[in-house]
Amino acid sequence: MTSRPICSEVKVMAKAAAQQDDTSKYSSGQFQAIIDKCEGCGRIVEVEASKFCRTFVAPAAKWRLGFCNFATHVKPEIVAAAVRVNPLKASKRAAAKSKKK
């Protein structure tokens, strides 16, 4: 009968294997290095003194049209336009609601 490894040992071994696969993935040349706009993002992985995006292969392409939708350090600005309300229509709507009750 063979002894089985404890669950925690299996988890540690699986995590080490996954981490080794990640580093080889970045060093193979498939992933491109990040650009200056990516600095400060939470998805950056540093491998062998180079920084790569964990999510996207070509980070420069994501910044081409404005901002990267994967960026954790940049939030899009939402512009709220002020809506002009016609006071006459607003008073008629209010009167109609009060008649229903």
Image: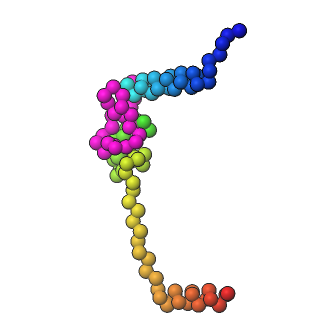
Region in magenta: 28-53
Residue 62: percent from left, percent from top: 38, 45
- Residue situated furthest left in the rendering: 36
97 lies above or below 74: below
Quadrant where the C terminus sits is bottom right
Determine whether, in the image, residue 34 is placed left or right of residue 3.
left
- Going 42% across and 36% down the picture, which residue do you hit? 54
Foreground of the two, 51 or 30: 51
List the single residue furthest toward the right. 1
Colouring: rainbow
* In this view, 1 is above or below 67: above
Quarter of the image holding residue 23? top left
- Is residue 81 in view from this perspective? yes
What residue sits 39% from the left and 28% below the top? Answer: 26
Whole-percent x and y of residue 17? Answer: 50, 22
Measured from the top left, where is residue 27 in percent x and y? Answer: 37, 25
Given residues 29 and 15, the one toward you in this image is 15
For residue 11: magenta?
A: no
Say which quarter of the image contains residue 10. top right
Q: In the picture shown, does residue 4 fall above or below 73? A: above
Task: Identify the residue at horizontal 40%, vertical 42% (top origin).
Answer: 42
Does any portion of residue 61 appear in the rendered image? no
State the residue at coordinates (71%, 9%).
1
Number of numbered markers: 0
Whether 39 is among the magenta residues is yes
